[in-house]
Image (cartoon, helix red, strand yellow):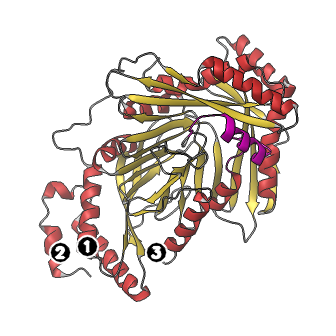
Amino acid sequence: MASSASVLYLAALPEADRSALDLASREDLLDICRRAVDAARLRGRPVLTSWAMPVPHTDALEVWRRSRRVADRAMLWRSAWDSTFLVAAGTAHDLSEDGEDRIGAVRAAWADLAEGAVTGGGPTGELPTGQGPLLVGGVAFSPATGTARPPFPDALMWVPAVQIRGTAAAATGWGTPLGELRLNAVVDRDSDPVRVSRNLLDLAERCLSPLPGAPDGGPTDPPLVHEPVELPSAADWKSLVGRAVRRMREGAFEKVVLAREVRYVADSDFDVPAAMDRLSRAYPEATLFAVREGGFEFVGATPEYLVRLTDGTVHTLGLAGTTPRGATPEEDAVYEKDLTGSAKILHEHDIVVRMLREALTGSCADLTVAPSPTVLKLANVQHLSTPVEGKLAEDAPGILEFAERLHPTPALGGHPRAASLDWLAKNEGLARGWYAGGVGWSDISGQGEFAVAIRSALVHGNVASLYAGCGLVADSDPEEEYQETCAKLRPMLHALGIE
């Protein structure tokens, strides 16, 4: 039961500030915060507390648009697998790490924090995957080296203060008739539960209510963009492809994935919310993500997931081998035949599938691998695709351990892993940052989703760095590989209004 003083505080709030949370809900939140502080005193360590309630008619894109203005961090996620969306705003607890063991360190810290969480709130209905407070964020392709460090840590994972989830009403939409609002905090023995609940309520209201004097509005006109800079230049990148091919023919490794960056500078800031809306409409089959930190935003629409764990089943996807889409059905069919009939592409794809199978075998009681790849057709390209799924054994790990085990797959780095990654570190000359890393979330039970961070861009005001890569094998052609990367850049070029 809330104290009379706290009830007076809650009742004194202006009516406009109580639009999403009624007085009884606020009292319940305060009671949960008190229980968590009591638990922290009893256990002698910080305690994660989480409280939830249903919220109607949630428009995830608009809530995220507001959240990125008022919170220190914000994340938007829409899953391709079940159309669930997630908006994360603010930080209840930071679990960011750097170095080779970045995922393992986050996994251990999350397991320790999640144990004994104090939760409460009213029933919110069933969400397809994941319950309770979430750990959200992403990891870089590889640890940063040298003095020029990327804007994001090697692993930027955090428990959001405000977490809103739901299921989109349509594949291309952001709205839902019912969602879940969850407020999270980490308290210690000296925390003031009134202050904790007050801060959570304040941030939730600012995320859910239109900002005074700052209407959300619609998308702005695309900015004027200056001539792009290719890093490295087209000629140098093709030369690097040739060097990689020679090393593979010498037997150094079987496959390597080579990336490049194209940087654009505009005369005004890029409209990131408008870009996410364009991506949603153009790529309904993709998983969409946007992570904002310190004025930088890493955004994308990826067709590939690293790993998904739900209801005792682990899902991965082998996605390797690419051809363009045709301008006519007849031309499209020709490209598809090139994709499915190419010994080079089939070999590249098989390397990825073999690695996924081997990585899951020891943790699954039953493993299913499609007998042959299918063709995944996107708006701009088509890929060979093979799902790999397994029923988990009783002692199977959670999603963060699977992510640690699988990343990077041969579709992102190469094969064998050690030799190909070593060659990239010495020759690629590109600070990938989060490109070809992973973005996603985990709940406290180990369920969750991580997508492969491709078809992506890093945006900072009026500067946007777009990334693309392709898998090389011993008979790769430099010009063909360069054209493949150009095709893979088009989703973000369109989204940012560049072309």
Q: For mark 2, give the secondary structure.
A: helix
Q: Is 175 in the magenta? A: no
Residue drawn at (47%, 17%), measured in percent from left and top? 499
Q: Report the residue marked by disc 2.
A: 7
Spot occupied by residue 455 in the image (x, y as percentages of width and height): 57, 33
Q: Report the residue marked by disc 1.
A: 27
Circle 2 residues within 10 Å: few <14, some 14–19, many ≥20: some
Q: CA distance from mark 2 to mark 3?
A: 25 Å
Mark 1 or 2, nearer chain start? 2
In the image, 87 versus 281, the foreground residue is 87
Q: Magenta span covers which residues?
A: 407-432
Q: Is residue 133 left or right of residue 337?
A: left
Q: For mark 1, give the secondary structure.
A: helix
Q: Report the residue marked by disc 3.
A: 117
Residue drawn at (45%, 15%), measured in percent from left and top? 227
Q: Amino acid at mark 3?
A: Ala
Q: Between tags 2 and 3, which lies in front?
A: 3
Spot occupied by residue 361 in the image (x, y as percentages of width and height): 81, 58
Query: How many callouts does the rendering have?
Result: 3
